[in-house]
Image: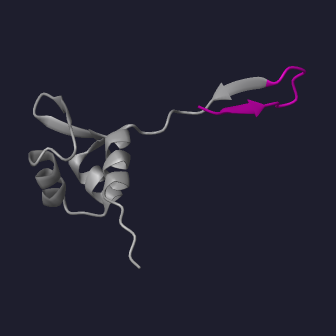
Amino acid sequence: MTETIVNKGSRKAQRIPSPPAQRLFDLKAAAGYLGRSVWGVRELVWSGQIPVVKSGRKLYLDICDMERWIERNKETWI
């Protein structure tokens, strides 16, 4: 988390923390992040390739898990 220093004419600078980066993504946002369709993300979840966080009936994907999936699936073409 970074902080912003604000000094509006006062003698003392005031530190305002910036909001934390988004960690959990719903299926639609995760699909956009991964460049896949919502159904494509569902298939990744159903096949156990990416774990989910459940809240009631809603499913959320952790950005760390999505990054891990990306790293595991990188290939080099020669």
Task: Name, please, the residue furthest toward the bottom.
Answer: 78
The one nearer the camera, 64 or 30, is 64
Residue 4 percent across, percent down from the top left: 70, 34
- Name the side, left or right, on which 74 lies relative to 44: right
Task: Name, please, the residue furthest toward the right.
Answer: 11
- Name the side, left or right, on which 33 lies relative to 26: right
The one nearer the camera, 45 or 33, is 45
Residue 9 percent across, percent down from the top left: 88, 29
The correct choice, above or below, for 42 with respect to 2 in the image is below
Span highlighted in magenta in the image: 1-13
Examine the structure image and report whether residue 72 is included in the region drawn in magenta. no
The correct choice, above or below, for 40 with respect to 7 in the image is below
Residue 77 percent across, percent down from the top left: 38, 76
* Main secondary structure found in the magenta portion: loop
Residue 12 percent across, percent down from the top left: 86, 20
Residue 1: name its quadrant: top right
